[in-house]
Amino acid sequence: MNRLVRAASSITGFTLLSRILGLWRDRLTAQALGADWVAGTFLLAWTLPNLMRRLLGEGALSASFVPAYTKLRRTDPAAARELLAQVAGTVVVLLTPVCLLVASASLLVPPEWLPAPAKGGVPAMRLLLALNSVLFVYSLPVCLTAVYSGAMNTLGHFALPAAVPIVLNAFWIAAVLAAGPLGITVDVEIANLIAWSLTLGGFLQLLLVVVPLWRRGELLRPRLGLPVRGTAAFGVFAAMGPTVLGMSLNQISSLLDQLMAYYLVAPGAVTYVYLANRLLLFPHALTAMSVAIAVFPKLAHEANDVDRARMRRTLDLAAAATILVTLPAAAGLIVLGDDVVRVLFQGEKFTEADVWPTVLTSSCLVAGLPFIGLAQLYARAFYALGDTRAPARVAAQLVGLNFVLNLVLVLTTPLGTAALTLSSSLSALLNAAILAVRFRRHAPSAHDLGSAWLRSLVATAAMCLVLPFVKACGPEARTMARAFGNVALPIVVGLLVYLLAHVLLRSPELQALRRRRGGAGSPDA
């Protein structure tokens, strides 16, 4: 477990830098494009390749590939290298024609054929098609990057794959900052410049993981062609089908939220949903995602045990750790939401009128952070055992439920985009609960997570009671003063209060974490 803690720490460090840059890019983009139809159309166009990345790259393909690759690495390293080459080659063969077809169709389809929003109309559809023709190509390099990153994680290298998103953020930021000096001031032209930069950044991301694998001798030439039935590569893609749906609830829910915001609320309202997702991803990447990525190879390794006792213990400890870190992150972001949104995004075209919708939409989404983290953790545990059907069935049902909840809440409440994210959080809660219960069929629970929930809830409540009294600045303070006095300072104090509460409660999960960090130099590390 010492190695797991160090791996999660290295992932968290680089992910923190990536998320900071990501928030900077979102600040620049929000201020450059505002929350009008151009911004909404750009963000909607970016959603599709981003969905491909999360489902096929970092999600389903990685979840199917890592267990198979891990197993072969222990018994036959040469076969593992061949599996990597076959999977990479299949991705190229499958995605290249799809990318070309989508790009070509986006250039040829008349925008009048598409349903246009009330605001923006045909020009919005014209921009959507133009952006899609460029951005969808990003799907190919980013999915390959995810495959190679999974191989590097299995080999024990976590830091570099975690640093890969930094490249994309750097290209995005550079595009927004370069627009002015290049004389590009029209919002439509800025959106196109960002799109081209993102696609270029995707190919450079791929180089960042290809070169280290090649230097280690782990990289073979991709085997172009479809995998043969009975091979390990065929097994990876056969398992991937249901896995796509099993890991897709949050991503598909996000796409539904943005589509409904675009057509049922207003095109610019997509900005609120997008920023809410970005604010969710920041704590998610630093907490639940780091735990899930680091623990997945270990779960895949221990899944081969006859009694699966070690696997269940690892899973329960990871679930307790997920609760420990996600609950205060979600509550803190909700309490500090107004100041966070103002500090990060307000300015230029992102006005006072955009602040409250963003705060409310974000709060409703961030409330589901602990359940999103737990659902993804349990889904990975199912995949480590080779059971891809259970998460897929649950996700299929909940995607439908989420769609119905979206319609009901949007049409019957005044919440606007917040209704969409509230629906997503409720679906995530159900997803985590159902998966947790069904996993008991594979391995009975070894630890009482109810007590872990109770301790973290008490500590979080203590933290939230303190946060409003720690703010040092008034509403008229400058942005930097507000950032330090009303965001950074409360976060530091709140974290100390939270940890102190756990110490007073003698929380075993906190003590276990401290012991593992202290034993980093032990022989079993």
Image (spheres, rainbow, N blue to C red):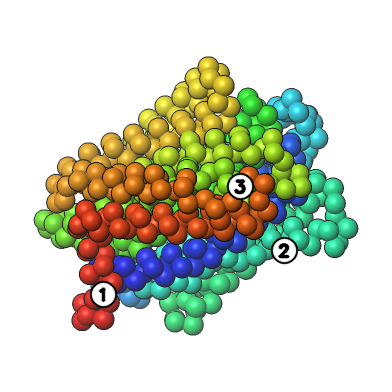
- Whether residue 244 appears in this view of the structure is no
Instruction: Give the amino acid type for the residue marked by disc 3 in the picture.
Output: Gly
Please state which of residues 224 and 315 is positioned toward the viewer in this rendering.
315
Among numbered discs 3 and 2, the one appearing first in the sequence = 2
Instruction: Give the amino acid type for the residue marked by disc 2 in the picture.
Output: Ala
Among numbered discs 1 and 2, the one appearing first in the sequence = 2
Where does residue 28 sit, x and y in percent of width and height? 70, 54
Tell me the crowding category of disc 2: few under 14, some 14 to 19, or many 20 or more residues within 10 angstroms, Cα based. some
Tell me, for residue 474, which label it has, or none: 3
Residue at image coords 55%, 26%: 415
Please state which of residues 112 and 288 is positioned toward the viewer in this rendering.
288
119 vs 28: above or below: above
Where does residue 453 sit, x and y in percent of width and height? 26, 45
The quarter of the picture where residue 19 lies is: bottom right
Judging by the rendered image, the residue that carries numbered circle 1 is 518
Residue at image coords 34%, 54%: 498
Q: Nearer the viewer, mark 3 or mark 1?
A: 3
The answer to whether residue 246 is left or right of residue 509 is right
Instruction: Give the amino acid type for the residue marked by disc 1 in the picture.
Output: Gly
Tell me the crowding category of disc 1: few under 14, some 14 to 19, or many 20 or more residues within 10 angstroms, Cα based. few
Instruction: Name the element at disc 3.
Output: loop
Among numbered discs 3 and 1, the one appearing first in the sequence = 3
284 vs 127: above or below: below
Tell me, for residue 7, which label it has, or none: none
Instruction: Name the element at disc 1.
Output: helix
Q: List the single residue furthest toward the top.
A: 412
Tell me, for residue 174, which label it has, or none: 2
Residue at image coords 51%, 46%: 336
Mark 3 in CB contact with mark 1 (< 8 angstroms): no
If the image is split into quadrants, where does the N terminus sit?
bottom left
Tell me the crowding category of disc 3: few under 14, some 14 to 19, or many 20 or more residues within 10 angstroms, Cα based. few
206 vs 519: above or below: above
